[in-house]
Amino acid sequence: MDPMSFSIEPAKELLSAQTHIWNHIYSYISPMALKCAIQLGIPDAIQKHGKPMTLKELAISLSLHPNKALSLGRLMRLLVHSKFFSNQILSSSEEAYDLTVNSQLLLKDHPLTLAPFALMVLDPIFVESSHKFSCWFQNEDDNPFHTAHRKSIWAYISCVPDFNKLFNDAMASDTQFVVSLLMSNDEFRGLLVGIKSLVDVGGGNGTMAKAIAKLFPELTCVVFDLPHVVQGLTWYDKNPIYVEGDMFEAIPPAQVVLLKILLDLQMMNITAGGKERTEEEWRKLFISAGLNDYKISRNLGSRSVIEVYPF
Ligand SMILES: C[S@@+](CC[C@H](N)C(=O)[O-])C[C@H]1O[C@@H](n2cnc3c(N)ncnc32)[C@H](O)[C@@H]1O
């Protein structure tokens, strides 16, 4: 096709397609700008300041290199656009930045902070495996993580202590957020009334189980996870109890089995066969496992709670 032969109308369409592609391929800059803001502590600095902060104040409080102060304005412009900060013009005519509800959830000392989760998802170890998607589609590896790192994610985590901590802290921050919502909901709290034993399978560092045990001290909770996750963990009154093992071999018996997990392409990225399912796919899975009564509650944002019963 002769590139000079387009009339104006198709050219408009092409330009729109080019914009679409550019928006898509450059969209990775947005989470990386957010990661930079979390790492620099921009939300925390504004919170500490107690009122909207000018670029100059922000640059000083973050101890930025003097040559980088102007670039901070470019970073903040994108983060205002993506609704992590708001901006306003002060009476001095300077622009000042304030937190939004989105950045409040990224404050390091917010009780429901999602900062550790964001930093884990955007860590080069995870991002690197997403660079291997196309390779993985053509090889025999279980997942792109294996293609990138030559090990399963769990084997990798077990021998890289810093990444083990990053991952477990990240999951704990997500779980703290979810469990706070669940346990403030009468319906969900009601599900555990009268229950005597619960096992959280793949329960990480026990954030979910600790919250449940605090609300229901008579309920014995077990956190079941791989050795590198639970080794050395104890809780002051032995509830929850930490048990190490492999869920594909056996899990400790309990009246209630709890499982809490992640997203579809991320599961494709890191697990061997883990995936999100439609309701019909879940139904078939439950029936094939001899579990035929279930209820899905979709009032947890992007996720759902699925209760499954044996009869
Ligand atoms: C996505 S994390 C979820 C952690 C926790 N449920 C939460 O939501 O915060 C998955 C957890 O499953 C654990 N896990 C992975 N394979 C396992 C296995 N074969 N047996 C037991 N736990 C396993 C991991 O160590 C990790 O803690």
Image (cartoon, helix red, strand yellow):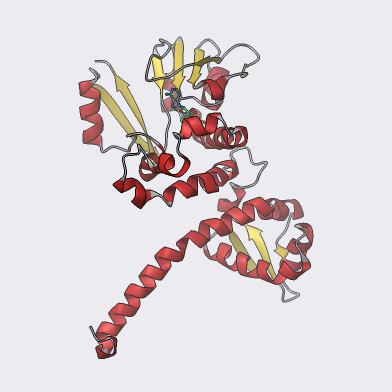
Where is residue 174 shown, x and y percent of the image?
Answer: 52, 37
Residue 11 in which image quadrant = bottom left
Q: Is residue 53 above or below residue 19?
A: above
Identify the residue shown where x is 56% and y is 25%.
205
Where is residue 179 shown, x and y percent of the image?
Answer: 50, 31
Where is residue 37 shown, x and y percent of the image?
Answer: 63, 56
Q: In which quadrant of the rendered image does the N terminus lie? A: bottom left
Residue 34 in which image quadrant = bottom right
Q: Is residue 96 above or below residue 243?
A: below
The residue nearer to you, when weighing 116 against 94, is 116
Across the whole image, how many numbered discs are drawn on residues?
A: 0
Where is residue 301 shown, x and y percent of the image?
Answer: 42, 43
Q: Is residue 210 visible?
A: no
Q: In which quadrant of the rendered image does the C terminus lie? A: top left
Residue 3 in which image quadrant = bottom left
The residue nearer to you, when weighing 50 against 26, is 26
